[in-house]
Amino acid sequence: MRYRVTSESEDRFNARISLRNTSDRPVSGWILRWPLPVGEHLLAAWPGTGRGSEAAGEAAIRDGGWNALLPPGGSAVTGFSGSRTHAEPVPEVITLNGRPCRVKVW
């Protein structure tokens, strides 16, 4: 899993997440989840649906349907817009269908 902030201002930012299926089995449908720091909100996600708020304590992005199947070695890219009260580090843990993934910044 790779994570990159693509643009930011004082209280808003956009990020891109690239995921890759490194297993020998296809993934049919995916959802990414990670904890949201205090003061951070997920405003929109693409492609697919996203939700998340400080109150929920979690952000989640679901596949867009057309990109739901990840064959072995396959990849998908998603992104989101968020708001924040202060700069936050990259999430240490993002789960894919409940399984923790390593997060690399690129």
Image: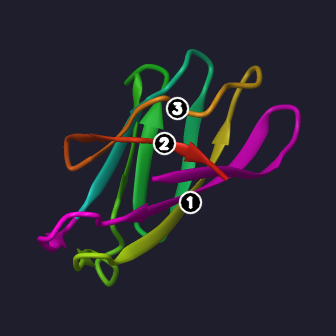
The amino acid beneath tag 3 is: Pro
Location of mark 1 (residue): 79
Which mark, by number, is residue 91?
3
Residue 11 left/right relative to 3: right
Q: Earlier in the sequence, mark 2 or mark 3?
A: 3
Q: Mark 2 or mark 3: which is in front?
A: 2
Q: Is residue 33 above or below residue 77?
A: above
Extent of the magenta region: 1-29
Q: Quadrant of residue 60?
A: top left
Q: Is residue 99 above or below residue 75?
A: above
**Disc 1 + disc 3, Cβ < 8 Å:** no
Q: Nearer the viewer, residue 42 or 23?
A: 23
Residue at coordinates 54% horizontally, 20% vertically from top-left?
37
Which mark, by number, is residue 101?
none
The amino acid beneath tag 2 is: Val
Residue 23 left/right relative to 21: left
Label 1, secondary structure: give it: strand
Neighbourhood count class around disc 3 (C-alpha, 10 Å): few under 14, some 14–19, many 20 upward = some
Q: Is residue 11 above or below residue 65?
A: above
C-alpha span from label 2 to label 1: 15 Å
Q: Nearer the viewer, residue 44 or 95?
A: 95
